[in-house]
Amino acid sequence: MNNIYIILSVAWKEIQLLLRDRGTLAILFLLPMLIAGMIGGGNLASVEGEESAILLSIYLVNQDKADFGTEVSKAIREIQQLEVQEIGSPSEAEGQIARGKAAAAVIIPADFTQKINEHQPTQIEVIVDPAQPESASIVTGIMNQVVAEVTIWGEVQFGVRSVLEESGILAEASPQEQRAIGAQSLGVIMTRINEIRENPTIAVENVNIQGEEAGSWLALYFPYLFSGITVMFAFFVVGTMAQTLLNEREAGTLRRLLAAPIPRGAILAGKTLAYMLLVCIQIAVLLTFSYLAFNVMMGNSPLGLVLMTLGVAFVATALGMLVAALSKTPEQAGNTGTILAFLLGGLGGSIPLGSATLASRAGGLRQVLAAILPNGYAVEGFYRLMAENGDVARILPQLGVLLGMGVLFFLIAVWRFKFEA
Amino acid sequence: MTAILEVDNLVKKYGDFEAVGGVSFSVEQGEVFGLLGPNGAGKTQTISMLTGVIEPTAGTARIGGYDIRSQMDQVKKINGLVPQDLALYPTLSARANLNFFGRIYGLRGKELKERVEDVLRIVALTDRADQAVDKYSGGMKRRVNIAAGLIHHPKLFFLDEPTVGVDPQSRNHIFESVLRLNRERGMSIVYTSHYMEEVELLCNRVAIIDQGKIIAMDTIKNLTALLGGGVIYVGLARVDDEILAGLAGLPAVAEATTVPSPVAPPASEEQALEAADRPPVSTEALVKVVAKQNQQAIVNVINYLNEHNQNLTSLEILEPNLESVFLHLTGKKLRE
């Protein structure tokens, strides 16, 4: 009973000290919120931008007033990423491009429809501003898509006509009847092609675990991003804790505690308790922030989240003690802790390094690193709970490994820590 | 009188280095006992073993009848420690610091509150108790440092160099507090310092410690009596056995011996050139004269040297005090 009172007294003293250390609180709470806010906000903006932004301004010269020229012209105008302005002649368009008024001009030749109908080669010309080579590739890509559609029409029309002619059905028909039969056959085939496009026989359906269609890849990416950032900053406590422990030794307060009738373990336990509480509050604040600001899924297991939070808090504080035990000065401990937090974050999978796949599932070196570092297990555990609606049973392996690592770090720290310098 | 502290051949070694080489002494109930020695002499190591901060390599001690090796938990309840460092949390107030140190001694509730107020009164900091310690002057911090060691009302109070870096006013305040604790509350005190004035003022008995060993231990009166009337250091251009015998035979002189000249560090070229321009100071011979009576011995020595045509190059007179006792016993000054 008395030992518990002493442990709580040490913990309360640590909390009082932490509350007066505004710099540390800013690093542990404000910095991760700022970083998470910037990255999350950036991702949201890019997704919204994909649907509405105009990428390029182009000129369109349609010299073909027949079917295919009109179709291509219409298709180009419907592309959201293009701001299309019709202009009279190719030379005028070329002049405007040269003056930098637009990134490119699309020229549909006068015999475009006729050539397609006769199954003759034809081409749509794209004039680009040589000063904007990237625009050329974008416009060319868009035009290839548009023309592919027209090409299908032309190919089907040519095929229908060939079949009808070879079958002899049109031999005795009048020109009007021939056109009617051709158009009817073409219409039936194209209708069927469009039906197949809209309702394919074999399709890949994009659904999330909850059975709803994924509105956006962000719904799955955000739990990874925010749990990763949260876990990474939870490990920033390593340097803070190690530094304060060695500061106590250097300042002599540890000496005074050693002279008091209390077990040495109570001093370490009280300190660990305070920093575990700090990490738990930090994780709770960051996850709440991600939920309120970015509507990040939190899953259906509050108990799982609590256990995962305790697991991360335990392994982070135990690592803090280990760093203190292996460092000679408070400065060395603080620097080592900060470097470790970044390294564990980068290598252990807290930071999505050019990939939206969890490090623990990425394969290769990333997965190997995630399998030996606590961050990999912590992020995987949170992801299972938040994005995959996992329950406590689903995170038991991760919890077990975190607990094991924490016990190992703690035992080495107690073995190696020198209460006297 | 019964002893509250009995130290028996206490040893602390770090590898081959012997920090404390078998010290033995005792402190009576209600006594203020001084441990006097230069920095690194082994004072803090000795106190650290007695307060349970470090384990002794060999030897033991009994405090209040409890053995420090087997009953340290009981010993720690009797002991109070004021470490040499300012062992406080600087961003917390004096009251918050004292509350915390009280709690770790198991105090709580009304008792804790009363003890905190009591020790704040002792160190005269009640008015500023709620101010953060890092806003205090050096002397005030030292006073809080002492208060934290008193919070559980110890019977044996260890003060390890409690006045380091303290202004004269605060130093006097600390002296008064220590004397009041001893006289009014009957607290036994072990006071370490390398300031002989402090030990002379506060302590009944003193152990002089150097290189981990106690080289003398007695009351201050008896220790200074070792020097008789004092010590005179006489610099001579030349000395021989005949002169030494002559000096030793003078009526007011108890003893005359030669002292090896200290080895000067190698001078730089610049210093050597400067020295060449100054008149030579003889370091050829230094005679230590232990006087029975200082004034008379000075007259005798000067007359003797004049009569024997000896050139006096320097003369240093040391009044009999702990500083001169330490110099007499170790050949070096306390603050070297």
Image (cartoon, coloured by chain):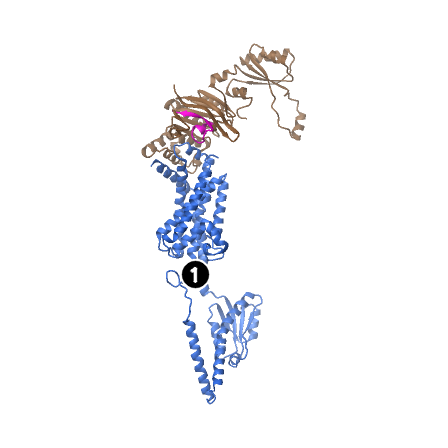
Where residue B80 appears, x then y in whole percent? 40, 29
User: Which chain: blue?
Assistant: A
Query: Where does label 1 land, which residue?
Result: A217
Of A191 and B266, the residue lying toward us:
A191
Q: Nearer the viewer, residue B275 or B244?
A: B244
Quadrant position of the C terminus of chain B in the picture: top right
Kindly indicate the quadrant of the structure image that contains residue A91.
Answer: bottom right
Q: The brown chain is which one?
A: B
Magenta span contains residue B47: yes
Task: Work out whether B114 lies above or below A195.
Answer: above
- Using residue B246 as the reference point, say whether residue A244 is left or right of it: left
For the record, the magenta segment spans B46-64
Tag 1, which chain? A
Q: Find numbered disc 1 in the image and state the secondary structure of the residue it sits on.
A: loop
Residue in the image at 45% along x and 60% along y: A45
Disc 1 crowd rating (10 Å Cα; few below 14, some 14-19, many 20+) is few
**Vertical placement of B100 versus B276: above or below?**
below
List x then y, in percent, for residue A157: 48, 80
Q: Can residue A281 be seen in this view?
A: no
| Residue at screen point 48% across, 16% down | B222
Residue A290 percent coordinates (x, y): 40, 54
